[in-house]
């Protein structure tokens, strides 16, 4: 039972880390895309 509980905890921990990493990457990409768009808009105008 202890091994199974540890396995579940370990899996949940990895899942949490993956979710946080995905959110961080999406946020960074969105910020970069917005910055690039802003730069392009400034160049056009």
Image (cartoon, grey):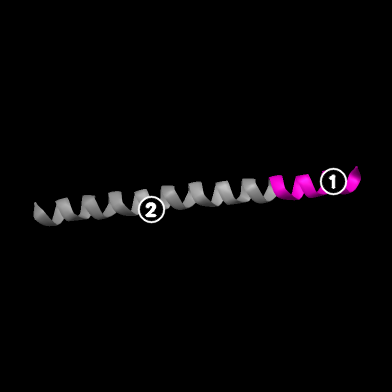
Against 41, residue 3 (above or below) is below
Q: Residue furthest left?
A: 1
Q: Residue at x 25, y 55 (%)?
A: 10
Is 41 inside the magenta-drawn segment?
yes
Left or right? Give the position of 18 relative to 34: left
Marks 1/2: CA–CA distance: 37 Å
Q: Residue furthest right?
A: 45
Q: Main secondary structure of the magenta part?
A: helix
Q: Residue at x 63, y 45 (%)?
A: 30
Left or right? Give the position of 14 relative to 25: left
Q: Residue at x 79, y 49 (%)?
A: 39
Is 7 inside the magenta-drawn segment?
no
Secondary structure of residue under mark 2: helix
Across and down, in percent, residue 21 comes to 46, 53
Q: Which residue is mark 1?
A: 42
Across and down, in percent, residue 11 comes to 28, 52
Across and down, in percent, residue 6 comes to 17, 55
Q: Quadrant of the C terminus?
A: top right
Bounds of the magenta span?
34-45
Q: Residues within 10 Å of mark 1 (few under 14, many from 20)?
A: few
Which label number is shown at residue 17?
2
Q: Residues within 10 Å of mark 2 (few under 14, many from 20)?
A: few
Residue 41 falls in image quadrant: top right
């Amino acid at each position: 039972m202890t091994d199974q509980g540890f396995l579940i905890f370990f899996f949940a921990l990895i899942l949490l880390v993956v979710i946080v990493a995905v959110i961080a990457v999406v946020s960074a990409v969105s910020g970069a895309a917005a910055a690039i768009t802003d730069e392009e808009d400034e160049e056009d105008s």
